[in-house]
Amino acid sequence: MKNVWIGLAMAIVFAGCANKDPLDIPTGSDVTVEKTDGVTVAGRLVEVQPEQVVVESRDGLKTRVPRSQIASMHATPATADRDTRKDAQTAAPNAAVRPAAPAAEDRRTAAPSSASGTSGSAAEARADARADESQRAARAANRKPEYRELTLPAGTTLSVKLTTTVASDTSHVEDPVRGTLRNAVRVDGFEALPVGTAVLGHVTQAQPAGKVQGVASIAFRMNTIDMPGDGARENVSTATYSRVSRTTRRKDATKIGVGAGAGAVIGGLLGGGSGAAKGAAIGGGAGTAVVLSTKGDEVRIPAGTPVTIKLTAPLTVRVKGE
């Protein structure tokens, strides 16, 4: 009966150890989280919840990692070294006494057998070394590349060179717009978006120039980043880029005024003062007719034009770590 109770007690102890949370690291510690998809997240552990942990990077950005995606989490060297020193100080008084060296007679007795096996031991050591080297090479070949997640905050500007032409009189809403990055974008010293990264979007407004009233306008917005190489496409939120044509009111007034002046001169020559008045009215009407039949200037942004696009929401990209 006594043995039965002892067995039950040991089972309870082992069950408690098995249920211990492997992520039982105090908040405020510097940690490194390795996710199941190969991504590594490093920073200060600021929050531990049943369904996720929150890690804050050096620049203040917080990353939420679901526990289902955590492969492992451990303290960084600074925290680990501190815990190691603490454990060593605790264990020092209880350290076992090192066993004494074997007596001279025992060494003499063991000498012949050691000498006889020297050659075989050396060969075995070389074989073990070759096996270890082969295993290390195999692990290195099968090792997945480490990735790093970089976040571009809202307000980041992207210098883009258009590779498509957009215009107020030829473009239509939802027409595709494409460009490439003229300058690389870096975060914390790492290159998040290299030069040449494709930026994709669409036309959001295309208003041709009207007659007399209404100026031309063109607008577009980018919504996708196409990472180079094997990188995937990332959705992006940007501000709308737009251009509006200049008003033609001054030119229209000039056309009407010139027409009225010419009519007054001709009317004056033919009919005196009353003829001048009639000629001015006729000439002004002719100028007005010209204005009413003439459209204003269109807006055209040709391919190769540099434009600046601003992010309106943070963008997180995944790049290979160094």
Image (cartoon, helix red, strand yellow):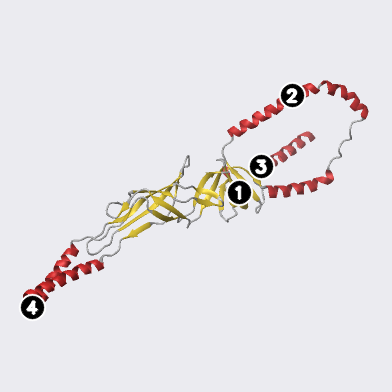
Do tag 4 and tag 1 residues touch (Cβ < 8 Å)? no
Kindly identify the residue that appears in the image at 28 percent across and 59 percent down.
216
Q: Quadrant of residue 140?
A: top right
Q: Secondary structure at mark 1?
A: strand
Tell me which numbered mark, 2 or 1, is placed earlier along the sequence: 1
66 vs 200, left or right, is right
Q: CA distance from mark 2 to mark 1?
A: 42 Å
What number is the disc on residue 178? none
| Chain-order first, disc 4 or disc 3 | 3
Residue carrying label 4:
272
Q: Give the SS element for disc 3.
A: loop
What separation in Å lies between label 3 and label 2 (alpha carbons)?
42 Å
Earlier sequence position, callout 3 versus callout 2: 3
Residue in front for this viewpoint, 269 or 43: 269
Q: Position of residue 309 (x, y in %)?
A: 42, 55
Residue 25 visible? The answer is yes
What x and y, as percent, mark residue 215?
28, 62
Q: Which residue is mark 1?
A: 42
Residue 238: horizontal and vertical position, in percent?
42, 54
If you read the primary sequence from the N terminus, does the residue marked by circle 4 or circle 1 appear first? Answer: 1
Q: Which amino acid is tagged 1?
A: Ala
Q: Earlier in the sequence, mark 4 or mark 2?
A: 2
Between label 3 and label 2, give the one nearer the viewer: 2
Q: Which residue is mark 3?
A: 19
Which residue bears the numbered disc 2? 124
Secondary element under disc 4, as helix, strand or loop, is helix
Q: Which kind of residue does numbered mark 4 sit on?
A: Gly
